[in-house]
Image (cartoon, rainbow, N blue to C red):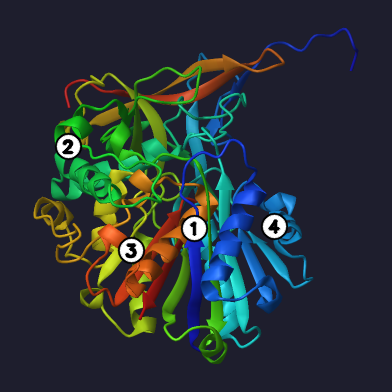
């Protein structure tokens, strides 16, 4: 390592269970996790043991698809300084069998209601801030898909 | 296990005490509880101190240096919002097991204007808060309420009625941080915090302290002719459910705790005279009606519509005004809920007294999660 070689700027996922391919953003990021070999429970990210049955694996790696639907939500109006509000904070059930917390876009935040339940959503990734080394920090977000 | 009596119980009015430190608040509550018991620190064989933010700074021992450093064992407890009630349970278990005859349980917290958003580090670069949903309490309890809406068609107005009830109760509780009635339209029109909860549907945070003196039956006889009894003291954590921890599950561990508590106490929910439950947000209260078996599945909305949980109703809930009015100094809350029940059982609750109260249930849940249920009887 030479001291003058400045490291090129990278895109870093905000959480370990979001994977960004080498050629990101040309190739989109995806959510990643494991499946328990004993009970079949699925988890975001790596695990030491299964929270459901205690199995210590080996766990089967899973690449989760970005499609799912809104299970429940809140519209957060008051949050920590520096964050955009109001925003739709939802719990998304992915079609591939795991649940993820996410901001959802494409809904009128002034009109939350029962028609939001079960709305189909699709994941996208976006730079949300820059870390102190100058790398982009990338998060997974969801958008309501039209038609459904 | 031996029978355990609560012989002394007291609390400070919750609120803001910028001129006092938290050790002083805890010391004042402890001395008030020991006075109530008719004992002194010399009688106390074990101290359990609940405080969320100061347990890593040996607050229990610092309190002892203020009230009498007798050299007895001191345990510092931290268990989210269930911190105080977990401290109470540790004291209970220690007396019930026969290891000690007299234990002092203290709950304290000083939060100032910290608020329930707390000290989350959105400043931390890699914090997901607000960019990948929310893990902060207002949003989490909003989502929990919305889940009930999805399952049962519960409305925002029904959740708002919880705030109307609890704020109405608070008018008669001089220990509450706020004693202000809030009519339904004021609650619904208040500033939205996290749907479906508005400002008046969220508990304020602040400073407070509460304490209780627990004794074995034999010891209690030396100090009082009318002890109240711990019929059950239960602590649970949240078991695996498929969406947890992505979505905190506040229901399953409360159901597990209530089932165990009713079994231990040998009673059912229909035998309760009153309940003090963890209404950190208005949405939570309705969920807990069902979790505690106060009504059937999906009936909580109707229960609040019918006014069944007002003082004077079928099963009064949060006669104190609840956390929504009383405030929620995290470590103090769990002990204060028990103090409130003790006052009612003794007939000392003043204008908010639940008539002829014989058995009360105190419930607390801390996210992460920990749930305590204490059933106290005459
Ligand atoms: Zn498993």
Q: Is residue B63 above or below residue B164?
A: below
Could you give the CA–CA distance between mark 2 and mark 3, rounded to whole angstroms? 24 Å
Front one among B156 and A60: B156
* Element carrying mark 4: helix
Q: Is residue A50 visible?
A: no
| Discs 2/3, front | 3
- Say which residue appears at 41% left-offset and 36% top-offset: A101
The residue that mark 2 highlights is: B183
Q: What is the spatial separation of the Cα atoms under label 4 and label 3, in whole angstroms? A: 28 Å
Query: Relative to residue A125, is residue B288 depicted above or below?
Result: below
Q: Label 1, on which residue?
A: B11
Measured along the vertical axis of the image, is residue B218 above or below residue B102?
below
Viewer-nearest residue: B22 or B264: B22
Q: Nearer the viewer, mark 4 or mark 3?
A: 3
Q: Position of residue B101 (x, y in %)?
A: 62, 84
Name the subunit of mark 3. Answer: B
Quarter of the image holding residue B62? Answer: bottom right
**Neighbour tally class for label 4: few under 14, some 14-19, many 20 plus, Cα within 10 Å:** many
Same chain, marks 4 and 1? yes
Q: Are marks 4 and 3 in contact (CB under 8 Å)?
A: no
Tell me which label, 1 or 2, sits earlier in the chain. Answer: 1
Q: Nearer the viewer, mark 1 or mark 2?
A: 1
**Pointer 1 or 3: first along the chain:** 1
Q: Is mark 3 within 8 Å of ligand 1?
A: no
Residue highlighted by disc 4 = B63
Check residue A67 in the rendering and tell me which mark sits there, or answer none.
none
Identify the residue under disc 3. B349
Where residue B185 sits: x, y (%)? 15, 32
Q: Residue at x 39, y 63 (%)?
A: B340
């Amino acid at each position: 390592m030479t001291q003058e070689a400045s490291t090129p700027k990278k895109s870093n996922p905000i959480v370990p269970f979001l994977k960004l391919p080498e050629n990101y953003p040309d190739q989109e990021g995806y959510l990643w996790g494991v499946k328990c070999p004993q009970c079949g429970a699925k988890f975001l990210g790596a695990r030491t043991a299964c929270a459901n049955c205690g199995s210590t694996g080996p766990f089967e790696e899973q690449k989760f698809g970005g499609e799912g639907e809104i299970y429940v939500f809140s519209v957060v109006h008051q949050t920590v300084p520096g964050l955009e509000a109001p925003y739709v904070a939802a719990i998304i059930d992915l079609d591939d069998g795991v649940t993820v917390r996410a901001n959802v876009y494409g809904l009128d935040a002034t009109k939350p209601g029962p028609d939001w339940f079960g709305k189909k959503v699709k994941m996208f990734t976006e730079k949300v801030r820059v870390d102190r080394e100058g790398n982009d920090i990338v998060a997974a977000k969801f958008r309501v898909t039209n038609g459904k | 296990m031996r029978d355990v009596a609560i012989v002394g119980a007291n609390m400070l009015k919750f609120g803001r005490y910028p001129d006092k430190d938290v050790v002083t608040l805890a010391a004042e509550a402890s001395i008030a509880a020991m006075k109530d018991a008719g004992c002194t620190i010399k009688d106390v064989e074990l101290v359990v101190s609940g405080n969320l933010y100061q347990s890593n700074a040996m607050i229990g021992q610092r309190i002892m240096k203020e009230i009498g450093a007798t050299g007895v064992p001191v345990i510092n407890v931290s268990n989210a919002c269930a911190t105080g009630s977990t401290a109470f349970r540790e004291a209970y278990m220690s007396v019930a097991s026969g290891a000690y005859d007299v234990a002092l349980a203290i709950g304290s917290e000083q939060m100032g204007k910290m608020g329930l958003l707390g000290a989350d580090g959105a400043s931390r670069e890699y914090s997901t808060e607000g960019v990948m949903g929310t893990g902060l309490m207002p949003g989490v309890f909003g989502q929990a309420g919305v889940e009930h809406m999805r399952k049962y068609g519960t409305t925002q107005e029904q959740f708002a009625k919880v705030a109307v009830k609890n704020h109405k109760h608070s008018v008669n509780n001089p220990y509450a941080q706020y004693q202000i009635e809030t009519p339904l339209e004021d609650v619904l029109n208040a500033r939205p915090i996290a749907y479906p909860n508005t400002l008046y549907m969220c508990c304020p945070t602040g400073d407070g302290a509460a304490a209780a003196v627990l004794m074995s039956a034999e010891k209690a006889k030396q100090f009082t002719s009318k002890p109240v009894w711990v019929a059950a003291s239960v602590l649970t954590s949240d078991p695996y459910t498929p969406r947890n921890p992505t979505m905190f599950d506040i229901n399953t561990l409360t159901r597990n705790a209530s089932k165990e508590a009713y079994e231990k106490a040998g009673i059912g929910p229909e035998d309760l005279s009153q309940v003090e439950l963890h209404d950190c947000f208005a949405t939570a209260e309705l969920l807990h009606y069902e979790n505690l078996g106060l009504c059937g599945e999906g009936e909580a909305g109707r229960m609040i519509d019918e006014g069944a949980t007002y003082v004077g109703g079928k099963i009064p809930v949060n006669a104190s005004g609840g956390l929504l009015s009383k405030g929620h100094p995290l470590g103090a809350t769990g002990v204060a809920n028990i103090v409130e029940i003790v006052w009612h059982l003794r007939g000392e609750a003043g204008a908010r007294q639940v008539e002829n109260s014989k058995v009360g249930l105190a419930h607390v849940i801390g996210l992460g999660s920990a749930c305590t249920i204490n059933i106290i009887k005459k």
